[in-house]
Image: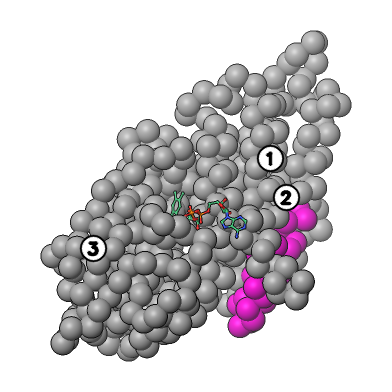
């Protein structure tokens, strides 16, 4: 368990991971199960699905059947609780090997949609929604961002007014992952006055009259169904209120912490895929009479990539342990997300350089990952907002 680099030439080999001495047989078994599933059901089709802009809906059911959708969720709703935060990191690493983040983002979108219901929602709401989502029958998205902005969450404009037994909702949401196909949406709305004290969360359902969606085209994550959502006098039953009225902001912030941990984990895993694919290439490719990997300039690129990835991994694993133990290390999660997305950005750039023209061609994992750097650096709290949050936590 002490070695850090033992990998071979196979680009799908994942042995370049810095080893974690606390992994048990359960962790290795989960990695093996997930890897088998991905290699059979996803990897052969990843590029085709990305080019097509969607993947088959039946993948949700298949992913649920092997425990991917329910991983980390309560048993009573069909999930599989985990004993620590490392399972999530393993999941991110294996999913990153697909090298098409849009599949990951939409397939696991319930990871941001469902937790607020489990954290602050009523028992009847949990019982109605969670089993259908964890079985892969229903897709659950999260809708916070609006056309007027996503960073300033306390300032959202979508309005919900209670009239009898229903909230009447008007407004719109922007850039919503899973927004085209989702059945359930956890939506942030303004039920009170200005600022964070006037925000509530509502469960919106796809068939509610007045609720429409349009798909959005984007730089990366092509296989993900990102959408704009429009609410035109949509009536949402009062029992679909998630938690208490005007207490939604806390639910949103709590959710951001796990989302940021997940995004950091994914970003570092994509960085490692870049290292591995470019290393496999540099070992085979010859220029000026020797292997690309024998040129010192290129060798140093690998050392730098590994240095950043391993440092990020150590921070990530420590944060994951703390979050699993019930802590809320807001400042560390913010720093971690910046660290991870900068690592991904660096490794995507270096890997592209090493691959040369081949890396610029469609169908190449590094090419797809390169296009997906910015969504990681912006989504779920941008690098600027993360740094701002850190300095506030530091009392500066
Ligand atoms: C592909 C994709 C999928 C997404 N999926 C979802 C989803 O499922 N659900 C959801 O709710 N949202 C989703 N988002 C939205 C995402 O979370 C937002 O894009 C993000 O929070 C930033 O908001 P914004 O784009 O409105 O930028 P803005 O808030 O308008 O900010 C624009 C730029 O200004 C910077 N900035 C803003 N304020 C400050 C400041 N005070 N100081 C310094 N710089 C500042 C930001 O960092 C950013 O770089 C998704 C976005 C993308 C691209």
- 304 in magenta: no
Q: Report the predominant secondary structure element of the magenta stretch.
A: helix
Quadrant containing the C terminus is: bottom right
- According to the image, label 3 marks what residue? 231
- According to the image, label 1 marks what residue? 347
Q: Earlier in the sequence, mark 2 or mark 1?
A: 2
Left or right? Give the position of 175 relative to 329: left
Say few, some or many: other residues with alpha carbon within 10 Å of mark 3 (under 14 / 14 to 19 / 20 or more).
many
Q: Residue at x 59, y 50 (%)?
A: 377
Quarter of the image holding residue 23?
bottom right
Which residue is farthest top?
Answer: 288
Q: Nearer the viewer, mark 2 or mark 3?
A: 3
Q: Residue at x 76, y 49 (%)?
A: 308
Let me know if residue 102 appears in the view: yes
Say few, some or many: other residues with alpha carbon within 10 Å of mark 2 (under 14 / 14 to 19 / 20 or more).
many
Q: CA distance from mark 2 to mark 3?
A: 42 Å
Q: Residue 193: x and y, percent?
A: 39, 80
Magenta extent: 310-336
Q: Residue 198: x and y, percent?
A: 41, 80
Q: Residue at x 48, y 26 (%)?
A: 362
- According to the image, label 2 marks what residue? 309
Height in image: 62 above or below 271? below
Q: Residue 216: x and y, percent?
A: 34, 44
- Determine whether the beta carbon of the residue marked 2 sits less than 8 angstroms from the nearest atom of ligand 1: no
Q: Looking at the image, do the residues carrying marks 2 and 1 touch, with CB atoms under 8 Å apart?
A: yes
């Amino acid at each position: 368990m002490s070695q850090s680099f033992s990998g071979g030439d196979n680009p799908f080999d994942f042995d370049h991971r810095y080893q974690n001495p606390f992994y048990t047989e359960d962790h290795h078994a989960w990695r093996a199960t997930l890897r088998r599933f991905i290699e059979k059901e996803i990897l052969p089709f990843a590029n085709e699905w990305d080019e097509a802009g969607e993947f088959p809906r039946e993948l949700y059911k298949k992913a649920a059947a092997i425990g991917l959708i329910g991983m980390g969720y309560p048993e009573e709703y069909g999930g599989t609780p985990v004993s620590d935060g490392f399972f999530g990191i393993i999941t991110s690493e294996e999913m990153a090997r697909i090298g098409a983040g849009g599949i990951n983002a939409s397939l696991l979108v319930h990871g941001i949609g469902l937790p607020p219901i489990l954290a602050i929602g009523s028992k009847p709401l949990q019982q109605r929604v969670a089993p259908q989502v964890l079985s892969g029958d229903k897709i659950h998205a999260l809708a916070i961002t609006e056309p007027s902005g996503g960073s300033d969450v306390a300032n959202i404009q979508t309005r919900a007014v209670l009239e009898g037994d229903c909230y009447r909702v008007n407004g719109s949401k922007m850039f919503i992952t899973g927004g085209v196909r989702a059945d359930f949406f956890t939506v942030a709305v303004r039920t009170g006055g200005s600022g964070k004290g006037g925000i509530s969360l509502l469960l919106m359902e796809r068939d509610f009259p007045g609720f429409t969606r349009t798909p959005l085209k984007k730089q990366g994550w092509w296989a993900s169904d990102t959408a704009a959502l429009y609410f035109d006098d949509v009536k949402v039953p009062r029992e679909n209120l998630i938690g208490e009225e005007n207490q939604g902001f806390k639910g949103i912030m709590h959710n951001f912490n796990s989302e940021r941990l997940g995004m950091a984990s994914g970003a570092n895993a994509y960085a490692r895929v870049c290292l591995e694919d470019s290393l496999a290439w540099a070992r085979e490719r010859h220029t000026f009479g020797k292997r690309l990997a024998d040129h010192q300039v290129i060798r140093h690129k690998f050392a730098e990539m590994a240095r950043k990835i391993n440092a990020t991994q150590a921070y990530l694993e420590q944060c994951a342990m703390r979050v699993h133990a019930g802590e809320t290390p807001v400042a560390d999660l913010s720093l971690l997300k910046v660290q991870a997305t900068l690592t991904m950005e660096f490794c995507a750039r270096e890997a592209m350089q090493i691959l040369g023209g081949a890396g610029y061609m469609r169908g190449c994992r590094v090419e797809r990952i390169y296009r997906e750097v910015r969504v990681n650096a912006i989504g779920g709290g941008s690098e600027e907002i993360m740094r701002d949050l850190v300095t506030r936590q530091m009392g500066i």
